[in-house]
Image (spheres, grey):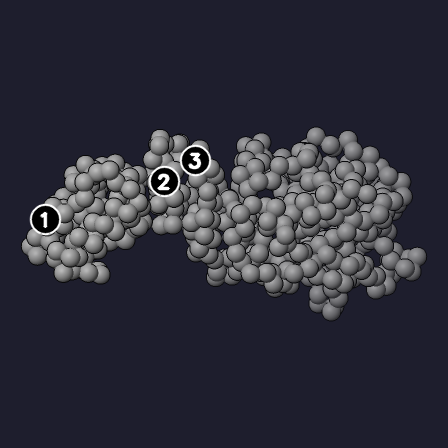
Amino acid sequence: MTVTVRFAPSPTGRIHIGNARTALFNWLFAMNNKGRFIQRFDDTDVARSTQEFADSILYDLHWLGIFPDATEYQSRRVEIYDAAVERLKAARVLYACYETPEELDLRRKVRRTRGLPPVYGREALTLTPEQVAEYESDGRRPHWRFLLPNFTGDPLQPERTEVRWNDLVRGEETVDLASLSDPVLVREDGTYLYTLPSVVDDIEMGVTHVIRGDDHVTNTGVQIALFQALGAEPPVFGHHNLLTTVSGEGLSKRTGALSIQSLREDGIEPMAVASLAVLVGTSENVTAAHDLSELAGHFDPAATSKSAAKFDPDELFVLNRALLHHMPFEEARDRLIVLGISGDKAEPFWLAVRGNLDRLSDAVAWWRILGDGPQEPAEFSGEDRDFLDQAFDLLPEEPWNGTVWKDWTGKIKQATGRKGKPLFMPLRLALTGRSSGPELADLLPLMGREGTLARRP
């Protein structure tokens, strides 16, 4: 049996780091098990789902390194769901209900006052044909509920009914169906809620493992019952902890909080996002993996904590710097060309500056400094200006090699008596306009003697 997983967001907004966590958990699980990854868009909410959002989700996944084996849209599979509904009706486990929202709310309040759980009381099962005809004549249209199983043989007197499964992440899990209302699967207008299409698609697409956020744990009890009602073996479920903001707030596609698009536009590397999204809230150390294959080696669903994981964007920059500081030129070359950094100096330039970058785009400022000199020339005291005049008079003749900085500063030290910061800082400010940055020993050969002399204050 081929391991098959799916990532099934609703295309109603741009995915955020929390959604990416779910997608990556599934992708890495498939990688580690030589399985398949299906991208499924749960787009039955016609009012809010758009192709634009679906396309943006695919773009974000590709940017992260996720390339689905198949892409499916629920809106194109309605006939399959219609057939499943007829099977459930024939099995007498899908029943029509005519209550209005106001009537349901009143019944819940009454049950609470009686000390009963506020679940649906299955009153629709006792409707007579005359009552149904009256509702229909009044223009009411039914919504359809799934009859959750019980062990008494009498649906009006359910006993404690527990659904158990061994969760990939959380271990043994139990949901008591008697504490839940029979879920509505079909709305009054004939459209489907989340549960039915999801289960039917998992069956039809051969999904073997469902890995998702732990806000779906209760849903899983209902879905396992629905799998069984449709004569199918339920998949293996795994429910990972959710990511929250540092302040503990949940993430939302609608608000755009920490969206993958915004992180990308902020210059964050995809593997910084992937590494933190996967490893935060697990027993693994959060380190920057070079690629998804390396990250897969650190991925174990069972290592995930049961408590929510707080996502600190500042940690992204720590990982981002780590990735950039070790990024080979071959990996950066094409992106540097797009930024206008190319030619014979591009590779030695990259190797010189990468250790000082927060974002790859920061290299542009150093490229300009290398070609045009300091963007904001520094101000010097009279003493430092005299020192720099003497220092530039000692600049070695060409040809220059990797020792020119050492040779030059050696002469300066001998001639002026300066050493340490009083020697190096004025030179750095004169050459770059900045008080910190790449090693001047690496930059000087790139500037050349003429370019260096041009920076003389």
Q: Residue at x 84, y 37 (%)?
A: 86
Estimate how packed mark 3 is, as few (under 14), some (14 to 19) or many (20 or more) residues with alpha carbons within 10 Å.
Answer: some
Mark closer to the observer (3, 2): 2
Q: List x then y, in percent, for residue 215.
A: 65, 56
Could you give the CA–CA distance between mark 3 and mark 1, rounded to whole angstroms? 38 Å
Mark closer to the observer (3, 1): 1
Q: Quadrant of the N terminus?
A: top right
Front residue of 319/253: it is 319
Q: Earlier in the sequence, mark 3 or mark 1?
A: 3
Q: Earlier in the sequence, mark 1 or mark 2?
A: 2
Q: Could you say which quadrant of the image residue 172 lies in?
A: bottom right
Label for residue 348? 2
Label for residue 389? 1
Q: List x then y, in percent, for residue 34.
A: 72, 43
User: Which kind of residue does numbered mark 3 sit on?
Assistant: Arg
Q: Is residue 111 above or below residue 290?
A: below
Looking at the image, residue 391 sits to the left or right of residue 38; the answer is left
Label for residue 333? 3
Q: Residue furthest bottom?
A: 115
Could you give the CA–CA distance between mark 1 and mark 2, rounded to whole angstroms? 29 Å
Q: Residue at x 63, y 42 (%)?
A: 9
Q: Is residue 377 visible?
A: no
Could you give the CA–CA distance between mark 3 and mark 2, rounded to whole angstroms? 12 Å
Q: Residue at x 46, y 56 (%)?
A: 315
